[in-house]
Image (cartoon, helix red, strand yellow):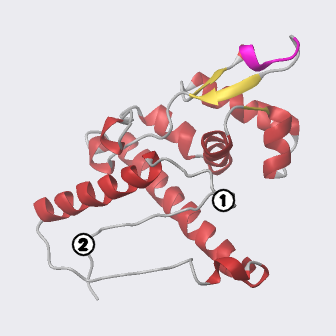
Amino acid sequence: MTDADLPKVTDSRVLAAMSHPLRRRLLDALNVYGPATASVLADRTGQAVANISHHLRALGAAGLIVEAPELAKDRRERWWRPVAPAYRWVTGDFDDDPARRVVAEAAASLNLDRQVGLVRAWYAAREGRPEWNGAAFSVDKWLHLTPAELNELEREILALLDRWERRDVPDDGQDREPVFLFTHGVPARP
């Protein structure tokens, strides 16, 4: 599935549900590590199981995750899996209504906070991970583009990321870890 094939969120209630910081972490954990129980997710996030259960129910009500009963060892155990590997949404799709626009703007802000927070956490902990110091990178560029050219650049970047996501991972004994990568392309002034 390419990024162009991902489900597109246009319901502001779904966008609000998935943008909550802890719920976003839960979606990320389910997508990176696979199906899990509330207990496993509580361990991964440092949260109470009851809190995780509450947020899993909210994600389920929004249609973002579903139960995976086939993974349960007994009827008390509840496993959850994401409905999709990720979602797309465009802030401009919510401009038709002031209330929806506020949700989209808040979601964009929370998303950026999350992205920057992950990068800041890396820099705070990097001394303990010297094997990654030469691999982690950051880049920024100033380009002169039209909106159509920026859309074309986005498609090219997404195609590259899709290729890396879909590649056959060699069974070469190398230790591979989840790597977070994000990019933004926005009009701005230096």
Amino acid type of the residue that numbered disc 1 sits on in the rendered structure? Glu
Q: Which residue is mark 2?
A: 187
Residue extending farthest to the top is 75
Residue 14 visible within the image: yes
Give residue 71's quadrant in the image. top right
| Percent of width and height locating residue 109 | 48, 60
Image quadrant holding the C terminus, namely bottom left
Side (left or right) of 32 relative to 50: left
Q: Nearer the viewer, residue 184 or 16?
A: 184
Badge 2, how many Cα within 10 Å: few under 14, some, many 20+? few
Magenta extent:
70-74
Q: Secondary structure at mark 1?
A: loop
The amino acid type of the residue labelled 2 equals Pro
What residue appears at the point 68 percent right and 48 percent down from the top-left corner? 22
Q: Position of residue 46 (x, y in %)?
A: 84, 52
Q: Residue at x 52, y 40 (%)?
A: 16
Do we see residue 98 in this rendering?
no
* Tag 1 residue: 177
Residue 51 shown in magenta = no
Left of 18 or right of it: where is 152? left
Above or below residue 62? Residue 172 is below
* Residue drawn where x is 33% and y is 49% of the image: 91
Q: What numbered label is drawn on residue 122?
A: none
Nearest to viewer (mark 2 / mark 1):
1
Instruction: Please report whichever mark, 2 or 1, sits nearer to the chain's N-terminal start.
Output: 1
The front one of 12 and 185 is 185
Distance Cα–Cα, label 2 vs label 1: 33 Å
Identity of the residue drawn at 38% across and 32% down: 7
What is the secondary structure assignment of the residue under circle 2? loop
Going by the image, does 98 lie left or right of 84? left
Q: Quadrant of residue 89?
A: top left
